[in-house]
Image: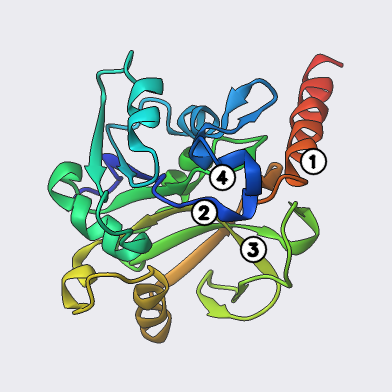
Amino acid sequence: MAAKPEAVMLFAAGLGTRMGPLTAHQPKPLIKVAGRTLLDHALDQVGTTGRIVINLHYLPDLIRKHLSPRRDILFSDETETILETGGGLRKALPLLAANPVFTMNTDAVWTGENALSQLANAWEPARMDALLLLVPRERATGHRGSGDFQIAPDGTLTRGPGLVYTGAQIIKTDGLTDIAEPVFSLNSLWDRMAANGTLHGVSHTGGWCDVGRPESIPLAEALLNEAIDVRTR
């Protein structure tokens, strides 16, 4: 098993129904924020991280066309059924050909330190089965709710209000084969890891915006513009 992940899974199969008319004719990852698609913002965080796999379901040909200039991306087809994050990751394992792997959602924008680099720098495979990148609730721009996890001094996570999952993580994939259901969320695996004390988290040091609704787009653009202003002062 590699000490640091050599592949990344980008989740892009969702219907994006919370985006309303914006996803009537395009998948959510192709919605533009500050002139660039959400998918391209996610790929900025991926950089040159080994093998890249993207799962597809809703209007998949549009995503394939958008990424056609790139020859370094593989696609995991979920055209018949959306398998959710757990089922989708399990289906993509032959393409990823790695363990552990990064996974990342494609409905957020980031500022500050690169998300995957921060995870890689904090990854300790001897004591972690997953490492989630989190932000405090007060810095979770565009996010609704009270948070997902609480973190102990040793970095282990339990469920509860406080820190918000950003959609980026490193995860060992061994436990996926133990889940019988074809369609399931990675929450099932996280709960097992939490019970074993192997679910860990680290706080993102920069900004993050959840772009899950139309009203979050201007918030995301403001966050990005603020980061540009800080860099140019």
Question: Which residue is labeled 3 in the image?
Answer: 164
Question: Which residue is labeled 4 in the image?
Answer: 107
Residue at x 39% of width, y 48% of height: 13
Classed neighbour count for the residue bearing mark 3: other residues with Cα under 10 Å, few (<14), some (14–19), many (≥20)? many
- Closest to the observer: 29 or 110? 29
Classed neighbour count for the residue bearing mark 1: other residues with Cα under 10 Å, few (<14), some (14–19), many (≥20)? some
* Secondary-structure class at tag 4: loop
Please state which of the two labelled residues, at mark 4 or mark 3, is closer to the viewer.
Answer: 4
- Residue 126, image x, y percentages: 29, 64
Please state which of the two labelled residues, at mark 4 or mark 2, is closer to the viewer.
Answer: 4
Marks 1/3 in contact by CB < 8 Å: the verdict is no
Left or right side of 11 for 229: right
Rounded to the nearest whole Å, what is the CA distance between mark 1 and mark 3? 17 Å
* Secondary-structure class at tag 1: helix
Rounded to the nearest whole Å, what is the CA distance between mark 4 and mark 2? 8 Å
- Amino acid type at circle 1 is Leu
Question: Which residue is labeled 2 in the image?
Answer: 167
Rounded to the nearest whole Å, what is the CA distance between mark 4 and mark 3? 14 Å
Question: Which residue is labeled 1 in the image?
Answer: 219
Marks 2/1 in contact by CB < 8 Å: the verdict is no
- Residue 95, image x, y percentages: 16, 42
> In the rendered view, would you say 136 is above or below 116?
below
Residue at x 68% of width, y 45% of height: 208
- Residue 114, image x, y percentages: 55, 35
Marks 4/3 in contact by CB < 8 Å: the verdict is no
Indicate which disc, 4 or 3, sits on the residue closer to the N terminus: 4
- Amino acid type at circle 3 is Val
* Secondary-structure class at tag 2: strand
- Amino acid type at circle 4 is Asp
Indicate which disc, 4 or 1, sits on the residue closer to the N terminus: 4
Residue at x 32% of width, y 18% of height: 68
Rounded to the nearest whole Å, what is the CA distance between mark 3 and mark 2? 9 Å
